[in-house]
Amino acid sequence: MSNTIIHSETIPAGAPWSRVIRREERLRIVDTHGAQAVDFLCYCAEDPAERYHAPNTIKKAGTILLTAGHALYSDKARKLFSIEEDSFGGHDTIGGCCSKPSNEMLYGVGNDGCRENFLTALAGHNLGWKDIVPNVNWFMTVPVDTAGAAHVAPGSSRPGDFVTLRAEMDVLAVISNCPQVLNPCNNFNPTDIAIEVLAPEN
């Protein structure tokens, strides 16, 4: 496996990010401080009308918690990314993203959230509100009990936990390094994360 890094950067706490990851390149997301949720969307770079689809992903995985060996599928049932490595295990697929309206609804405080970050990142790709779909939340869990009750769990990832995704086509990857301080997904303390793009295997 190639470990040649062709791009790396730090995404500040609460900030958006986007980049086209070329086929067979790998995107590594590192939770450098621990307990930091990372909201994630992805789209076919050639035709962004094809995008991440949570139901297809969940049905193929057979679980709502993603880890190595699973893949992110599009609404055309094609692989966008495969999860190659995962030190955390059990990333959320059902919690969606926070937003100013949902923060007002749930907590009575209209803080900007991940939807606003997504809108900022997507604007540079001529995409917008209607292009935001239910997303993956790396390093976050939403436990569901046998009666169907669900809640956002406190952040439990460790400093240095990471997930590595292999692009199965040219994929537009979009991140909101979650700014949430009104529920415990970031343990009420959003922090920086690191991004690495790795070259394809030779």
Image: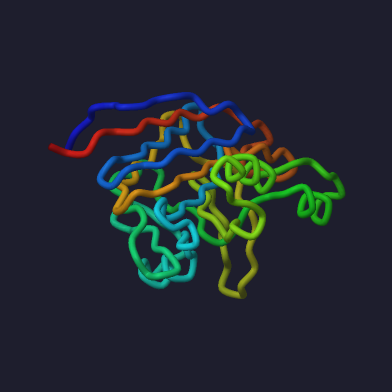
Indicate left or right for 47 with 155 as reference. left
Q: Name the spot of residue 85 as percent of width and height, x first.
A: 30, 44
In the rendered image, the residue lying farthest to the right is 108
Quadrant containing the C terminus in the rendered view: top left
Relative to residue 44, is residue 160 depicted above or below? above
Quadrant containing the N terminus in the rendered view: top left
Q: Quadrant of residue 163?
A: top left
Indicate left or right for 38 with 151 as reference. left
Indicate left or right for 67 with 120 as reference. left
Q: Name the spot of residue 102 as percent of width and height, x first.
A: 76, 54
Relative to residue 1, is residue 71 depicted above or below? below
What colour scheme governs how the chains and residues are painted in the rendered image of this protein? Answer: rainbow
Q: Name the spot of residue 17 as percent of width and height, x first.
A: 53, 36
Q: Name the spot of residue 86 as percent of width and height, x first.
A: 34, 44
- Residue drawn at x 28%, y 56% is 69
- Residue drawn at x 79%, y 53% is 101
Give whichever of 53, 153 is nearer the camera: 53
In the rendered image, the residue lying farthest to the left is 202
Indicate left or right for 69 with 140 as reference. left
In the rendered image, the residue lying farthest to the bottom is 147
- Residue drawn at x 63%, y 63% is 150
